[in-house]
């Protein structure tokens, strides 16, 4: 695929090396730049078969901690680079669209595999879990490993960093790096940390590339441009490929064939002059593609050793000056009395509080790799930080004048261009400067810079069904959060207030026709709109006077701290008293609590009650950060719905982190780490168990303290809400084993997934149902509209159908005499489990409730057994017939005290029956 074919062509030419062994021969350490985009699966921990569950962040952090310790031991310093450049047209639309299309196909394959087999997907369909970039940035920051995030052109900035800071080599997997020719080039896709204490990969002899391709060194950039890329696409070169004898589709052409053919053409050119080459390729120098070819060749020249000093990005490289002493250059800024050199949340007091909360959250963590801060790790971190972006002799170099190029002009015009309905002024200069600095150091969400400079944002493909059968489009679901963020970043409330004030006072020079509005283009790849046009999304102000973004970011007063937190909670629809009560919501679970509350405030019923408890039980589980236990734990049957729910919550956590950064980071970055509240594998296990647990204590492994924590946090999440839960699943699905066809409803059945019984229910007797036979979650007290969202006074009565019937649905057929009776489930009476056989035996022995507990007849056509009724029993007692009387058992006495079973069924859901019942305020 374009220039990447060159990387594929040289895969077999790589030589296996051990980076630790190479570091032994380097005095003062071996310093490398790592392009993280090419080894996300490696940084995730090599490969986990259950990555599709939502992310195993504890194991990810465990691997990164082990990697950091190994690097420090062998004196290898890494600077990890992430791609934060916005892929907006017309620079790189096709590359982003192709990447998202590939991910969409893989996601469809993964979900299809999970639905049909119920097992984790194979590695070939790897898709980065939602939140992986944020987890990696947070973990690396905690481990004191330097981070760099690109802002304009990822590959150019990575190789520029490698040259400016005189790193010994670059670790990546992009074909562009082969043309740029860094000092040494290693493969990031082959990176592997072994148990033999070695860091193995492949090294490419890039300086021998011209000899290998038999192409002169000065024509190597032309060869790369003719392979196709972001500037000159492969479709534009179709005619050229046909002239070389390549008639079939380029996707079907082996990379060796294409590269050898283009190498032969470049080698046979009479001269290296670009004009003559354009005429030879396109036939006319005035062809529009000729200008793009020259621009593509210049792009590759800018990344070489001789050309990178002259290259400037579209936004221009910022001069290396002391920005802490600079004054705001905006005369209209309202933050003249504020220190804009850093965020107010970066104070030592705030950072120490975040560290204390983190230590408290991980106090009981049992992991192979220690999460605590060790002296040795801190010393290594300080050594690594000394070689980070803050040092280097390249800072003394003077910036060269910025060349006037068509590419730069195009990017500049794109940045300043706004929709016709967008009349909001640009963001303040000090906000832009602070955002750019924090973005480059990986201290801020990457979407922030794209919103402030481009007014555009690109949202990746998620692990969701593109038909949205059960769960709505995740990106569209969290759009209200982003709309509030847009309004906060552009001070929409402040501009509207000032405009209205000027209009009332009559001092406005021009009439205010409409309120200040900002429009942000959201690029979302979907089946309806596969990345062709963006969706213009307006900003939405909050319902209270939000301070300016300068005050939110740089204000140090106590009121500013309170307003920062209130603004964040308002974006997440979580501005409630209990949300900030740490006895209900611990500090490290605030992100999860706000996400779950945002989901519950939606008009769309997404979560079921047992699913909400599964998320909370996962967050409070003692095994959450036990990486060794989670690795050995097996999950029987992974559901497609569970996988999508995990992606839904992690996408909400990403939106919460964006809102947190926009509001001035009121939540410390360390306590917002995802491994403190989420693990995909543990979540899938809890979701599967929640469908069959009888009470919340069973879901929490009978830890009563965990039950109390879950109930209190659920109460804080549902505070003041009129909750309507999602409907339970229908049992009549593929995999039902029971009666023949639809008669399975009358005979009872069981549900199997991947050969494992995950649910079973008894027969459906409309007139004679005696015991609750539905396999349902009985640990809660259903209101009139019960906990599963079933409407009606009777609610969920435990019928064999497994779900609630609508008003117009026909009643199930009566049980026939020749049908095999189902074995009813056990009955819980006053906290004691009673088997139906015991009730039947009591009836046979003269129990006063014999008629109510009469067993079904197993023989076809036989007459039912006649037993003494309660009325006859009372008569016999009155007459003094005690000859054949049998002492009442404890169960019989309990039944007699509670009355008939048809009345007990209503009282079965008592508030005091199970210890795990919720106390959340659920009103109707």
Image (tube, rainbow, N blue to C red):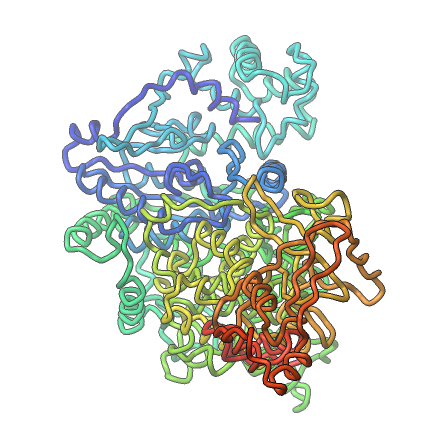
x, y percent for residue 498: 60, 82
Residue 549 in sight = no
850 up-or-down from 501: above or below: above
Tell me which corner region of the image, top left, top right, bottom left or bottom right, holds residue 495: bottom right
Instruction: Please state, as top left, top right, bottom left or bottom right, where the C terminus lies in the image.
Output: bottom right
x, y percent for residue 882: 55, 79
x, y percent for residue 120: 51, 39
Instruction: From the viewer's perspective, tell me whether residue 888 is left or right of residue 374.
Output: right
The residue closer to the viewer here, 189 or 859, is: 859
36 up-or-down from 4: above or below: below
Instruction: From the viewer's perspective, tell me whether residue 189 is left or right of residue 492.
Output: left
Q: Residue at x 19, y 54 (%)?
A: 378
Instruction: From the viewer's perspective, tell me whether residue 66 is left or right of residue 447.
Output: left
The residue closer to the viewer here, 901 or 207, is: 901
x, y percent for residue 382: 20, 52
Q: Residue at x 59, y 27 (%)?
A: 293
Instruction: From the viewer's perspective, tell me whether residue 56 is left or right of residue 144.
Output: right
Tell me which corner region of the image, top left, top right, bottom left or bottom right, holds residue 698: bottom left
The residue closer to the viewer here, 905 or 345, is: 905
561 up-or-down from 661: above or below: below
Q: Residue at x 57, y 66 (%)?
A: 839
Residue 38 in sight = yes
Tell me which corner region of the image, top left, top right, bottom left or bottom right, holds residue 70: top left
Instruction: Please state, as top left, top right, bottom left or bottom right, where the N terminus lies in the image.
Output: top right
Q: Residue at x 28, y 51 (%)?
A: 367
């Amino acid at each position: 695929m374009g220039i990447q074919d060159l990387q594929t062509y040289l895969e077999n030419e790589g030589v296996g090396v051990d980076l630790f062994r190479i570091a032994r021969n380097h005095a003062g350490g071996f310093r490398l730049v790592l392009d993280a985009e090419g080894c996300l699966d490696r940084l995730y921990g090599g490969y986990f078969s259950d990555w599709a569950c939502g992310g195993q962040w504890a194991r990810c952090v465990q691997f990164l901690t082990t990697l950091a310790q190994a690097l420090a031991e062998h004196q290898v310093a890494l600077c990890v680079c992430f791609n934060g450049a916005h892929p907006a047209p017309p620079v790189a639309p096709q590359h982003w669209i192709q990447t998202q299309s590939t991910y969409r196909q893989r996601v469809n394959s993964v979900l299809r595999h999970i639905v049909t087999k119920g097992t984790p997907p194979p590695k070939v369909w790897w898709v980065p879990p939602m939140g992986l970039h944020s987890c990696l940035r947070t973990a690396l920051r905690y481990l004191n490993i330097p981070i760099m995030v690109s802002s304009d052109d990822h590959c150019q900035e990575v190789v520029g960093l490698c040259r400016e800071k005189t790193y010994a080599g670059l670790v990546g997997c992009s074909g562009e790096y082969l043309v740029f020719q860094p000092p040494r080039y290693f493969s990031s896709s082959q990176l592997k940390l072994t148990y033999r204490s070695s860091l193995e990969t492949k090294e490419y002899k890039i300086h021998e590339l011209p000899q290998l391709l038999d192409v002169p060194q000065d024509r190597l950039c032309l060869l790369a441009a003719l392979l196709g890329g972001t500037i000159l696409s492969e479709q534009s070169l179709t005619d050229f490929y046909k002239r070389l004898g390549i008639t079939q589709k380029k996707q079907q052409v082996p990379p060796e064939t294409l590269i050898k053919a283009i190498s032969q053409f470049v080698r046979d050119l009479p001269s290296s002059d670009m004009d003559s080459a354009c005429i030879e390729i396109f036939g006319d120098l005035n062809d529009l593609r000729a200008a793009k070819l020259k621009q593509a060749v210049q792009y590759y020249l800018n990344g070489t050793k001789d050309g990178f000093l002259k290259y400037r990005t579209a936004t221009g490289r910022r001069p290396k000056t002391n920005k802490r002493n600079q004054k705001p250059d905006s005369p209209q800024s309202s933050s003249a009395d504020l220190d804009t050199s850093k965020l107010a949340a970066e104070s030592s007091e705030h950072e120490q509080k975040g560290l204390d909360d983190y230590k408290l959250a991980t106090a009981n963590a049992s992991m192979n790799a220690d999460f605590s801060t060790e002296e040795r790790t801190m010393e290594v971190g300080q050594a690594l930080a000394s070689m980070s972006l803050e040092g280097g002799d390249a800072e003394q170099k003077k910036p060269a004048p910025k060349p006037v190029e068509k590419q730069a002009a195009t990017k500049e015009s794109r940045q300043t261009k706004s929709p016709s309905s967008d009349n909001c002024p640009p963001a303040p200069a000090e906000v832009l400067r602070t955002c750019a600095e924090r973005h480059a150091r990986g201290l801020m969400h990457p979407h922030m810079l794209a919103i402030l400079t481009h007014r555009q944002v690109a949202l990746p493909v998620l692990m969701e069904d593109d038909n949205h059968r059960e769960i709505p489009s995740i990106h569209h679901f969290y759009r209200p959060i982003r709309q509030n963020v847009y309004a906060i970043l552009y001070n929409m409330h402040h501009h509207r207030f000032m405009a209205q004030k000027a209009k009332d006072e009559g001092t406005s020079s021009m009439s205010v026709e409409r309120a200040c509005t900002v429009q942000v283009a959201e690029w979302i790849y979907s089946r309806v709109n596969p990345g062709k046009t963006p969706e213009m999304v307006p900003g939405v102000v909050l319902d209270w006077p939000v301070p300016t973004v300068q005050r939110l970011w740089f204000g140090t007063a106590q009121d500013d701290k309170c307003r920062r937190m209130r603004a964040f909670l308002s974006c997440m629809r979580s501005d409630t008293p209990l949300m900030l009560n740490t006895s209900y919501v611990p500090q490290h679970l605030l992100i999860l609590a706000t996400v779950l509350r945002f989901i519950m405030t939606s008009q769309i019923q997404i979560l079921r009650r047992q699913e909400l408890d599964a998320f909370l039980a996962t967050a409070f589980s003692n095994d959450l950060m036990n990486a060794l236990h989670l690795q050995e734990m097996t999950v029987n049957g992974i559901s497609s719905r569970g996988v999508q729910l995990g992606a839904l919550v992690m996408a909400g956590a990403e939106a919460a982190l964006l809102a947190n950064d926009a509001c001035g980071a009121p939540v410390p970055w360390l306590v917002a780490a995802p491994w403190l509240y989420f693990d995909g594998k543990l979540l899938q296990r809890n979701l599967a168990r929640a469908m069959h647990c009888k009470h919340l204590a069973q879901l929490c492994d009978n830890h009563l303290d965990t039950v109390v924590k879950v109930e209190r946090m659920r109460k804080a999440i549902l505070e003041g809400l009129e909750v309507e839960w999602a409907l339970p699943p229908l049992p009549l699905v593929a995999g039902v084993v029971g009666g023949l066809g639809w008669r399975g409803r009358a005979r009872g059945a069981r549900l199997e997934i991947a050969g494992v019984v995950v649910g079973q229910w008894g027969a459906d007797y409309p007139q004679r149902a005696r015991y609750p036979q539905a396999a349902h979650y009985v640990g809660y007290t259903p209101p009139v509209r019960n906990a599963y969202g079933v409407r009606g006074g009777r609610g969920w009565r435990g019928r064999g159908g497994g779900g609630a019937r609508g008003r117009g649905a026909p009643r199930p057929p009566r049980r026939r005499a020749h049908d095999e009776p189902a074995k009813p489930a056990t009955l819980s009476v006053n906290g004691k489990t009673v088997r139906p056989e015991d009730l039947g035996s009591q009836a046979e022995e003269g129990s006063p409730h014999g008629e109510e507990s009469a067993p079904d007849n197993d023989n076809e056509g036989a007459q039912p057994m006649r037993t003494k009724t309660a009325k006859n029993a009372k008569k016999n007692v009155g007459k003094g017939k005690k000859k054949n009387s049998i002492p009442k058992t404890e169960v019989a006495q309990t039944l007699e005290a509670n009355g008939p079973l048809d009345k007990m069924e209503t009282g079965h859901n008592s508030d005091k029956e199970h210890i795990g019942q919720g106390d959340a305020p659920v009103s109707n």
